[in-house]
Image (tube, rainbow, N blue to C red):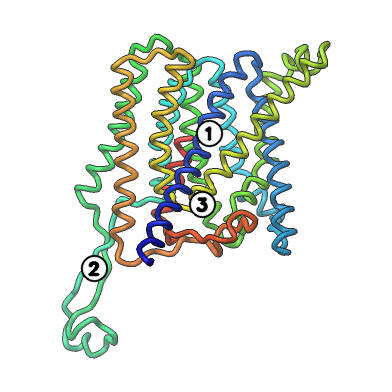
């Protein structure tokens, strides 16, 4: 009876995980092809992004209201000082990342976008090192002999005449692994774009710039979520606070590059066909729903499984995206391009594997800086708790996975 119950629990967990992964795939892959489809007929990607931000803010506000009514606990609301000083940099970087990514769809294919966007992992790694969220050193324990006088004065030493000292040392294997990750991702990106028949310099520059800013974005996001006093550990609260500043941060770009053209466009402000206007607005609203669903499905997947599951699922998602782009949109991908893509995914996989091994190899788990409580979407997650213990390595895996979006 006990074995049967364990088998049923295992099957249920496997089915649940598969369902959450498929839900994440639907939103993630769906919004990529949606953006490409919409920009073919609606050439205002920045306006599209701003409308998506407004929809995400609306759904975030509704979700917060539902959770507050259910739990009878007030949601966090930041002061203006904290909001402008701590949230604004993250919001600006996020707005530029998303805006430039959507802008690039005017010029490049889904396959080139997917491949180039995967390089965000490289920039996340670089900025994590700069901001000391990831370290190239590992702590080592050394037992230092003590003199008889010191041994008498030192209480609590591990053994008679020995003192415990903690030092840090960079190993050759760690340096070699980091260099290999960088070379694999950079080399794969070069091979994928080399002699590509559908290569566009302007679009490639936009999405590569988005990947670079994405490295800053997710590094700042991690630092923001680690500040326990802000209380933004719940992604719904984070999205609620980010969207208004993201909207304002993207508005100057919109005003310069799209404002005049949109004001004279017959699809929006100078419309003559009401049906066409409603179809356009409906299509834009659908994108906002997909964007909100993507963030929500990522949160559900991490909460019910682990960040490592999201990272691995992200790798296979890239493969599915390229296969669908080649089959549905006719993207031309040569053998050299496929080899470059495989090389880049190998670098991403190596980085995830190294992080997972490092996390499992720690003798005692580190507490996650700033996490005062677990994510608390009580309406959906009341019956379950995250199975993985919170630690810095797992959170970094989560942000690596986000960089692949």
Vertical comparison of 60 with 45: above or below: below
Q: Report how far apart the C-alphas of labels 1 and 2 lie in the structure.
A: 47 Å
- Under circle 2, the secondary element is strand
Disc 3 marks which residue? 223
Q: What is the number of callouts on the image?
A: 3
- Under circle 3, the secondary element is helix
Disc 2 marks which residue? 141
Is residue 224 found left or right of 312 in the rendered image? Answer: right
Measured as percent of width and height from the top left, residue 238 is found at 62, 49
Q: Hey, which residue is sitting farthest top in the picture? A: 197
Q: Quadrant of the image for the N terminus?
A: bottom left
- Under circle 1, the secondary element is helix
Instruction: Classify 10 Å Cα crowding around label 3: few (below 14), some (14-19), many (20 and above).
Output: some
Disc 1 marks which residue? 26
- Compare residues 210 and 130 and report the one nearer the observer: 210
Is residue 1 found left or right of 93 in the rendered image? Answer: left
Residue at 20% across / 47% down in the picture? 173
Residue at 56% across / 63% down in the picture? 373
Instruction: Classify 10 Å Cα crowding around label 2: few (below 14), some (14-19), many (20 and above).
Output: few
Measured as percent of width and height from the top left, residue 308 is found at 39, 48
Measured as percent of width and height from the top left, residue 164 is found at 24, 75
Which one is earlier in the sequence, the residue at label 1 or at label 3? 1
Vertical comparison of 397 with 33: above or below: below
Q: Hey, which residue is sitting farthest bottom in the picture? A: 152
Vertical comparison of 151 with 109: above or below: below
Which one is earlier in the sequence, the residue at label 1 or at label 2? 1
Measured as percent of width and height from the top left, residue 245 is found at 68, 40
Residue at 22% across / 78% down in the picture? 163
Vertical comparison of 257 with 388: above or below: above
Residue at 82% across / 16% down in the picture? 274
- Compare residues 27 and 92 and report the one nearer the observer: 27
């Amino acid at each position: 009876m006990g074995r049967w119950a364990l088998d049923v629990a295992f099957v249920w967990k496997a089915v649940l995980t598969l369902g959450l992964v498929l839900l994440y795939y639907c939103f993630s892959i769906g919004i990529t092809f949606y953006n490409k489809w919409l920009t073919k007929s609606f050439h205002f990607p920045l306006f599209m992004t701003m409308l998506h931000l407004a929809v995400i803010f609306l759904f975030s506000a509704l979700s917060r209201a539902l959770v507050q009514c259910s739990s009878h606990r007030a949601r966090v609301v930041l002061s203006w000082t904290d909001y402008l000083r701590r949230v604004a940099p993250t919001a600006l970087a996020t707005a530029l990342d998303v805006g430039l990514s959507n802008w690039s769809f005017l010029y490049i294919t889904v396959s080139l976008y997917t491949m180039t966007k995967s390089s965000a992992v490289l920039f996340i790694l670089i900025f994590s090192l700069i901001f000391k969220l990831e370290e190239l050193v590992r702590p080592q324990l050394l037992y230092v002999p003590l003199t008889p006088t010191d041994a008498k004065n030192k209480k609590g030493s591990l053994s008679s005449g020995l003192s415990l000292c903690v030092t840090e040392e960079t190993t050759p294997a760690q340096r070699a692994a980091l260099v290999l990750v960088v070379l694999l991702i950079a080399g794969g990106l070069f091979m994928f774009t080399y002699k590509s028949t559908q290569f566009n310099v302007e679009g490639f520059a936009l999405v590569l710039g988005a990947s670079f800013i994405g490295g800053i974005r997710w590094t700042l996001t991690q630092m923001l979520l680690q500040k326990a006093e802000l209380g933004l550990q719940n992604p719904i609260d984070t999205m609620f606070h980010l969207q208004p500043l993201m909207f304002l941060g993207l508005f100057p770009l919109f005003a310069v590059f799209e404002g005049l053209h949109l004001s004279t466009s017959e699809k929006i402000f100078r419309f003559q066909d009401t049906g066409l206007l409603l179809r356009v607005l409906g299509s834009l609203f659908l994108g906002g729903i997909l964007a909100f669903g993507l963030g929500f499905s990522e949160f559900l997947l991490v909460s019910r499984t682990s960040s490592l599951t999201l990272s691995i699922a992200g790798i296979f998602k890239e493969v599915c995206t390229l296969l669908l782009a080649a089959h549905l949109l006719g993207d031309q991908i040569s053998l050299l391009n496929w080899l470059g893509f495989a090389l880049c995914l190998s670098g991403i996989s190596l980085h995830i594997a190294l992080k997972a091994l490092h996390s499992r190899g720690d003798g005692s788990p580190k507490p996650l800086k700033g996490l005062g409580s677990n994510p608390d979407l009580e309406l959906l997650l009341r019956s379950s708790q995250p199975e993985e213990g919170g630690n810095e390595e797992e959170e970094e895996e989560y942000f690596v996975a986000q960089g692949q979006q």
